Amino acid sequence: MAIGSYALERLLRWARAKSPWLLHLNAGACCNGCDIELVAALTPFYDVERFGIKLVGSPRHADILAIVGGVNKQMEERVRRIYNQMPEPKVVIAIGTCSVDGGAFNGAYNVVGGVDKIIPVDVYVPGCPPRPEAIIHGVYLALRKLYGGDFLGKKR
């Protein structure tokens, strides 16, 4: 029995939505509070693996790029390169006040500003630092944007 292209595309979208791979990137200008909260969201206490979320170390395998911290001049080209290495479809989440607009480091001589000055950002998770629940909600919104509103398999 042959699978039609629409059915195959729907199956692939469902499979990708059930196993999003996340790449964590510190863009440089931050206090590391958001790093700690992001790592806390990935621990067994919050159990995001039940949603299929997996932390990966290579941009070539990632669906979601989670960036913490404002972008400094040293990291500007690296952030662009990592974003360009990610396969399509991809989504970017800016986590914390520093990654949204530069935060406390905005206006410093070596800080470019928020992540959206370098690459397109799909989801913003504000806070200094944001709670792990807010980060998980941001990942949910990113998946919804990436795979559509019905990625959880719910009937419309």
Image (cartoon, rainbow, N blue to C red):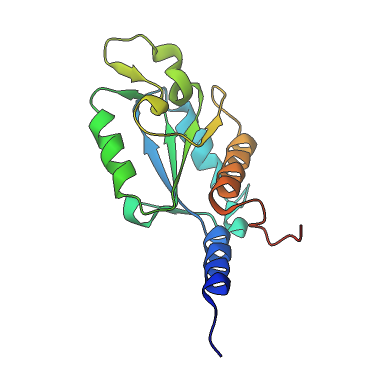
Residue 156 quadrant = bottom right
Residue 58 seen in the figure = no
Residue 75 quadrant = top left
Q: Residue at x 49, y 30 (%)?
A: 34
Residue 22 seen in the figure = yes
Residue 64: x %, y % from top left: 46, 47
The residue closer to the viewer here, 50 or 78, is 78
Residue 120 quadrant = top left
Q: Is residue 86 left or right of residue 17?
A: left
Q: How many marks?
A: 0
Residue 45: x %, y % from top left: 63, 48
| Residue 105 in the image: above or below residue 134 | above
Residue extending farthest to the bottom is 1
| Residue 8 in the image: above or below residue 136 | below
Residue 16: x %, y % from top left: 52, 61
Q: Residue at x 29, y 49 (%)?
A: 85
The residue closer to the viewer here, 107 or 42, is 107
Q: Is residue 50 left or right of residue 31?
A: right
Q: Residue at x 57, y 23 (%)?
A: 127
The residue closer to the viewer here, 128 or 15, is 15
Q: Is residue 77 left or right of residue 42?
A: left
The residue closer to the viewer here, 92 or 40, is 92
Q: Is residue 154 left or right of residue 31?
A: right
Quadrant, the N terminus? bottom right
Residue 27: x %, y % from top left: 35, 30
